[in-house]
Image: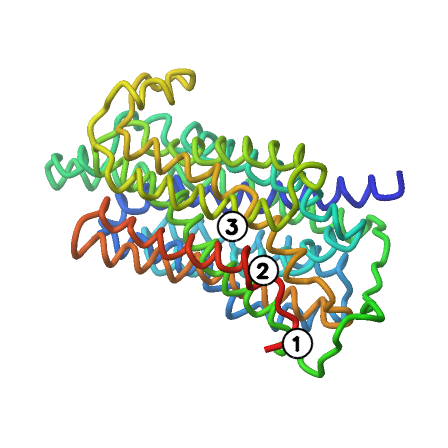
Amino acid sequence: MPTLIPMLAIGLLFFIFGFVTWLNGALIPFLQIISDLNELQAMLIAFCFYIAYVVMALPMAWLLERTGYKNGMSVGLAVIGIGCLLYIPAATYQTFAIFLLAQFIVGSGLTVLQTASNPYIVRIGPQESAAARIAIMGILNKAAGVIAPIFFTWLVLADFPNVSAASMAELAAAERAEQVSLMAAAVIPPYVGMGIAMFVLAFAFYLVRLPHIKEEAPSDAPVHESVLKYPQLVLGAIALFFYVGVEVIAGDTIGLYGSRLGLANYSTLTSYVMVAMVIGYVLGLVLIPRVLSQQGALTGSALLGLIFSGLLLVSSEQSTVIASVLWGWSGIAVVPDAIAFLALLGFANAMVWPAIWPLALADLGKFTARGSAILIMGIAGGAILPLVYGALAQGFDPKNSYALLLVGYAVIGYYGLVGYKKRHW
């Protein structure tokens, strides 16, 4: 199979995306504790990570046009390695600003990888099965997202059982300072290991051979002089902005919300969002394109998102039988309904990214690399919307602030019903 080696190589990258990205779900409540942050300040951790996609997307597209996809992947891995090593001074001096800088640099490295790998996986096979190929990548991505918070908890928090924002607030100042110092030191070894691994992988990708993909516009497709004159692309980037925003709100705030409710397992809650996403990806892989079109998967996902968000808003913050049924298999006997519905948003989110990419890149031809950069900039939703959520949660109420999710799924639904069809403004 000529695409096997490229699929394996890109699959490894998608696993790395997931591991590094969804590590934030455990990292954010952890840094909230050791840096004494409120909800809005804590969401700056996600903001600095995802804003890199806006700041660096077009420069990285320029880089890829000159280095090619493969060499660009090596550069991206090396940049992630540099960002991981910055956690050494950040944790040593317990300086929040250095943590934020490290997040930005890691996000910059991921920007290169995302800009290179997403169009590559779309173009390496038939257009109509592109969402299925991205779904395979998504399974690897979210499987890494399941592992990452558990990995973080095992390596960093194993010696700090039952620690949460609520429990730390009850400690005396001296005892709390000692606990913070111990927790900060525990974060250094895993990030050093990840940094070294990224440099090794960067060298490996420099050596591996990947086939070149050539972009040509179909003869019957409208050709524009500017990439911004393709409505399916621009509207797709807007849909991605809101999608990544709601995805990050679900995956990265569930730990904060759980910590606020006093749940001892707050650092692993992101894993359950990822489990739900993996289930959604597997289902999409089976159904697309045999039973369900890419557009049908997108609109169905938006509808599910609206339903689960609505149930979240009216659900209880107390543990009930419903939550026990949902989570009994996981080893967590009971969780609040609100946490359960927040985690189930992972299922609704699963097929949005795989469906939007091929729909948005359709008929772009020579503009595919730049179009990919525009879509990558849509990942800024992961920086902006969680920050908006943090401000709402700080000023009002964390659970009711999840009403922001309804706006995001409504925009995604519009693109799935109308926006993807447009070829002229």
Amino acid type of the residue tagged 1 in the rendering: Val
Amino acid type of the residue tagged 2 in the rendering: Thr
Task: Out of 160 and 363, give the one closest to the viewer.
Answer: 363
Q: Mark 3 highlights which residue?
A: 84
Q: Earlier in the sequence, mark 2 or mark 3?
A: 3
Name the image quarter holding residue 41.
bottom left
Image point (24%, 22%), residue name: 320
Q: Identify the disc placed on residue 27.
A: none
Q: CA distance from mark 2 to mark 1?
A: 19 Å
Q: Earlier in the sequence, mark 1 or mark 3?
A: 3
Numbered disc in front, either 1 or 3 = 1
Q: Earlier in the sequence, mark 2 or mark 1?
A: 2
Name the image quarter holding residue 335.
top left
Q: Identify the disc placed on residue 111.
A: 2
Dot 1: what SS?
helix
State if disc 3 and disc 1 touch (CB < 8 Å). Answer: no
Classify 101 as above or below 55.
above
Q: Mark 1 highlights which residue?
A: 227
Q: Quadrant of the C terminus?
A: bottom right
x and y percentages locating residue 127 in the rendered image? 76, 53
Image point (27%, 55%), residue name: 390
Whether residue 242 sits left or right of residue 258 in the image: it is right
Q: CA distance from mark 2 to mark 3?
A: 15 Å
Task: Out of 85 and 293, give the one closest to the viewer.
Answer: 293
Q: CA distance from mark 1 to mark 3?
A: 34 Å
